[in-house]
Image (cartoon, grey):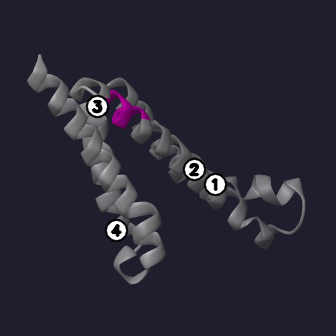
Amino acid sequence: MSASATVRILRLVVRTLLVALALFWFIFAWLSGAAEYGQGIGAVIRNLPNSVPWLFLFIIVYIAFRWELAGGILIMLAGLGSVVFFDAWAAPVVLLGVSLPLVAAGATLVACHIIDRSKA
């Protein structure tokens, strides 16, 4: 398998994982606090503001699809920022489920961009 094919596959895998990760955390944030508002669809709708910050991750993922280098850097920064925001050092689940996957995905996209540019 050539290096360019490997980069294409790696890029596809990372982008897919980023979309899945963003979707998972958006839905989790949206539904996890709904019980505080009661039962039913009204409670889920009232809890929607809790998931709004995860929409920013979707925006960053979109940027990564359009501009890989800028998006990769933003995703890495979001991962590092999540360590501080969520105090991830004290919560290994958050560190392993949010922060490190974002940093790794961003670094992978940056590496894919650099590899592609070095061939040109």
Residue 29 on image: x %, y %: 62, 60
Quadrant of the snapshot with the N terminus: top left
- Look at label 3 and name its amino acid: Val
Residue 72's mark?
A: none
Q: For mark 3, what is the residue?
A: 7
The correct choice, above or below, for 47 with respect to 112 in the image is below
Q: For mark 1, what is the residue?
A: 49
Q: Report if the CB atoms under discs 2 and 1 are less than 8 Å apart.
A: yes
Quadrant of the snapshot with the C terminus: top left
Q: Report if the CB atoms under discs 2 and 3 are less than 8 Å apart.
A: no
* Residue 42 quadrant: bottom right
Which label's residue is closer to the chain start, 1 or 4?
A: 1
Closer to us: mark 2 or mark 3?
Answer: 3
Q: How many neighbours does mark 3 have within 10 angstroms: few (below 14), some (14-19), or many (20 or more)?
A: some
| Identity of the residue drawn at 46% across and 44% down | 18
Q: Residue furthest front?
A: 1
